[in-house]
Image (spheres, helix red, strand yellow):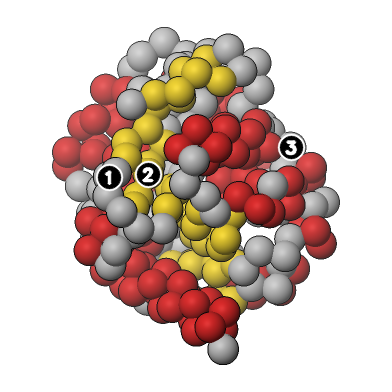
Amino acid sequence: MEISFEGGRIAYDDTANDGPLVLCLPGMGVTRQTYEPFVPLMVQAGYRVVTMDLRGAGETDAHWTDYSPQAIGRDAIALVKHLNAGPAILVTNSYTAATAIWAAAEAPELFGAIVLGGPFARVMPKPNLVMRAAQWAATTYRPLWMMFWASLYKTRKPNPAERQALKASLAEPGRMAAIKAMGDADKSVCEARMPEVRTPALVVMGTKDPDFPDPAAEARLVAGRINGSVVMIDGAGHYPHSEFPEETAAAVLAFLKSLKSHQNA
């Protein structure tokens, strides 16, 4: 399925069952296939789940003028309006955690809760020269990106089918350029909107997430700035929804159950 928006096509899958809407956005450099282990667990719990390919990724068009987190936020808002099924629970990972913050501030009526997995939700300290060179190489050359992506799974290996599909997708023209554009994007616009967020928020972080020197500290910092709660997934790397889907789904469902209990009190 797809929608047209801002001059491009955005691809998505929809379980199309009854239940509250959960919209899942992957991080940069991966596709909506990353949520395949997570989706059936949420459907079993009674939720309708939609997974969306980001600008430049998967089956969404490769070429856009804007790949920023807030541009993806506009896409998410457009999709929820198109589905006419809000307010949605917005589940994000990595790069799109900044998107969740922007979207919750921009259209609070469309999002009943946000979940930030392995969040790059703020402007991070500038890495040293060696790390900057490594990041440039990984976002420029497909084999290096594939190696980097796989290294972010710390206990369980990534699904071979997802690996092959991602490798094929990134071979298409414009896909690596989209990753580089996201890597260079400024998150300050989204970070500045943290004080505006009133939407209930959950930060889900792997205890072994190699993208952060202290994953638990980063989780607490982000959650504290948006008045959210934190769940650490023991042994998980940067993709807890894919590496530990049962544990991640349990954390998300417990969070949503607590919101219902509070609303009914």
Amino acid type assigned to the residue bearing label 1 in the image: Thr
Determine which of the numbered discs, if any, sits on residue 204 in the image.
none
Relative to 168, is 87 above or below? Answer: below
Amino acid type assigned to the residue bearing label 2 in the image: Val
- Label 1 environment density (alpha carbons within 10 Å; few <14, some 14–19, many ≥20): some
- Label 2 environment density (alpha carbons within 10 Å; few <14, some 14–19, many ≥20): many
Rendering quarter of residue 169? top left
Q: Which mark sits nearer the N-terminus, 3 or 2?
A: 2
Tell which of 156 and 54 is nearer to you: 54
Rendering quarter of residue 141? top left
Mark 1–mark 2 distance (CA, rounded to whole Å): 6 Å
Q: Secondary structure at mark 1?
A: loop
Classify residue 40 as left or right of residue 221. left
Relative to 101, is 231 above or below? Answer: below
What residue is shown with label 1? 15
Q: Residue at x 38, y 72 (%)?
A: 253
Residue 12 x/y as whole percent: 37, 33
Q: Residue at x 58, y 12 (%)?
A: 7
What residue is shown with label 2? 50
Classify residue 251 as left or right of residue 119. left
Residue 77 x/y as whole percent: 59, 39
Mark 3–mark 2 distance (CA, rounded to whole Å): 27 Å
Q: Residue at x 33, y 26 (%)?
A: 1
Determine which of the numbered discs, if any, sits on residue 186 in the image.
3
Q: Residue placed farthest to the bottom in the image?
A: 265
Q: Secondary structure at mark 2?
A: strand
Q: Are marks 1 and 2 in contact (CB under 8 Å)?
A: yes
